[in-house]
Image (cartoon, helix red, strand yellow):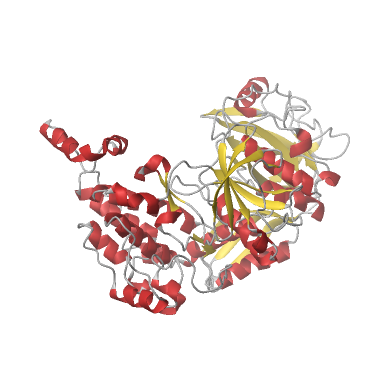
Amino acid sequence: MSDPKDDPKTVFVPSTPEPAPEPATEFQPGVPAEPATAFQPGGTGFAPRGEGTTIRVGDVLNHLFEVKRFIARGGMGEVFEGVNINTDERVAIKVMLPALAKDPNVVSMFRREAQTLRRLRHDALVHYIVLAEEPQLGVLYIVTEFIDGANLSLEMRQLGPDSSELLALLKRLAAGLDTAHRLGAIHRDIAPDNILLEDGRLDRAKIIDFGIAKEMDPGTATIVGEGFAGKLNYVAPEQLGDFGRAIGPWTDVYSLALVILALAQRGDVKMGGSLVDAVDKRRAGPDLSAVEEPLRGVLARMLAPNPAERLQSMEAVLAEVAKIEAVTPTKTDPKRWWLIGGGVGALAVVLAGGGLMLTPRGPAPSKTETAPAASNDPVQLARSAIDAALPSVGCTWLQIVEVAPGKPGPVARLTGVAGNPSASQNEISQVLAQRKIEGASIDFSEVAQITQSGCAALDTYRQVRAPDSHQLSVPQRKFEMRMQPADPTLSGYPGEKAANVVLQIAIANPKDDIALIGLEPSGVIDPEFSGPGTGVLGREGLKKLAGQTRMVTDRGGDRFQIQLDVNHPGWSGVLMISGKGPFDQALIAPPLGGRGPEWTNKFVSQAAANGWQTQMVWFKVVDEVTE
């Protein structure tokens, strides 16, 4: 990546591109004000400020987020409104209560909170912006997008939705929770006050506060222990100790049905009282007379007291919703009918009188019958468990190559790097064992060991890892060295032995800048791929290079192929940072001695300010002559 005469590294040949023009994009965070499970900001110490509030109005956190006003206090922390001083974006800031911050187990829970939330990407779910530590104040905090709207518990007495609006809300929230469940996160506290209505609209409802989110491991404890978690009116029977405390996606299914019922009857469901009363009421079942058929039937199946008899997943709920939509005409413009409020009935008459036929949408493929089989498929269970575990495995960057059936159980092949491959492999194996996936095994044969000096960089980059890492890829993970042509325009090592590595880039957002960084298992980071000083490459830079050199090929549709020449055997990696540039090379590729907590906090803060996301691939160069 630097001059090949100096020392062997990966080289990106050809003319250095001019910095791409700064894009017009602004930092667009995620969603609302009550976060989910956290991520580790470099392993720094945490000492809260005093015994009062941990932050105050007027504080500026990491020179980036100014605290504007106090909003609320929850079970784990306080929530403030703030502003990103670089972009003027309103944000919500959640900071841990001082009493809880003294407990390292609670701090760990807070970090896991951000870890779960960071991976959730759905319009109906709160989205994570950043977890950071303010070094001067000594506070750990989570930042999310600020949502301007009240929670459902404050609004449901005035809403009065009809059956189609209730169905639309059920579909939206179930789809969001399905996304969370597929990542191994169960909310366990679905209730009206954990659903925000942006601008007061049901069609913009967002689920907040994954603060007691729990991975799908029955043995995982939370700060409230193994027992009750959630609000007594809305929790499922198994959360009260019934039915063997079998917590799973079906637990959120039950609570979501009670939320829809509460909205239909314009008031909280009466499922609380004493603990004994709450258990008895669930065994008897709630009164569903406020809900019309066919939605009533769906809620009844969601509210079966025995989890084994209940709809098992949000996928099954969505399949039931699809059946109703297939035979029920729906309103064509949700925004319009919401805005006109009481004129909904009149609007329907006008549409019918005007001869406009509302054609029902064709039935979606029903997965109700196959859902239990899919949820019990060991291969899918193993993949889901590993996906959920990977972000929390320290000093790694791992990806699943495949999960295939095997004997006695599924075999998962992974690739990437780890500081301690054996320990990382054991950690993932323990997750599979905890999920009771019998006979599952992990293949780490394509995982390289990285030195401990590279761990701080991996752990920092991973904090803003893109949830869908498909924009950066290599067609294969092994490339063979061969003699290179003498023409210097065709190789970085003319007349020498090297491998021609193919890197594929698909630009998801045309306005994004990108920086490409080379990595070595020794911990060396080399930003030579990017433009000098600024680190900006971007779509226009790639297009320009494609016209100047054969090493970059424009495949059309914002897809590019880059040839990298590597003159040494062994593993190498490429990191891609996308978002708003420029990318200061001193920040994105610090030297070995400059990767302490201060760098981590600065990198994460800058990533939050500019919407950076990271993706990484690792590949192996082999010399068949020497091997």
Task: Report x, y in % for residue 552.
Answer: 65, 28
Image quarter (top left, top right, bottom left or bottom right) of the N terminus: top right
In this image, 15 relative to 264: left or right? right
470, 80: nearer the viewer: 80
Q: Could you say where residue 128 lies in the image, as x and y percent from the top left?
A: 56, 47
* Residue 503 visible in this rendered orientation of the protein: no
Task: Give the vertical position of 133 relative to 271 (above or below).
Answer: above
Residue 320 against residue 601 in the figure, above or below:
below
Q: Is residue 351 or residue 328 the one in the foreground?
A: 351
From the viewer's side, name the closer residue of 203 and 116. 203
Left/right of residue 123 with respect to residue 456 in the rendered view: left
Where does residue 415 sit, x and y in percent of width and height? Answer: 65, 54
Q: Looking at this rendering, what residue extends furthest in the right direction?
A: 6
Total numbered badges shown on the rendered structure = 0
Quadrant in which residue 306 is drawn: bottom left
Q: Look at 80% across and 46% down and name the residue there.
A: 595
Instruction: Specify the quadrant of the image occupied by residue 257.
Output: bottom left
Looking at the image, can residue 298 be seen? yes
Closer to us: 165 or 543: 165
Above-or-below relation of 293 to 309: above
Residue name at image x 57 percent, y 65 percent: 411
Task: Please state if 111 lies on the left or on the right of 29 as rendered.
Answer: right
Locate residue 376, reporting x and y percent. 43, 68
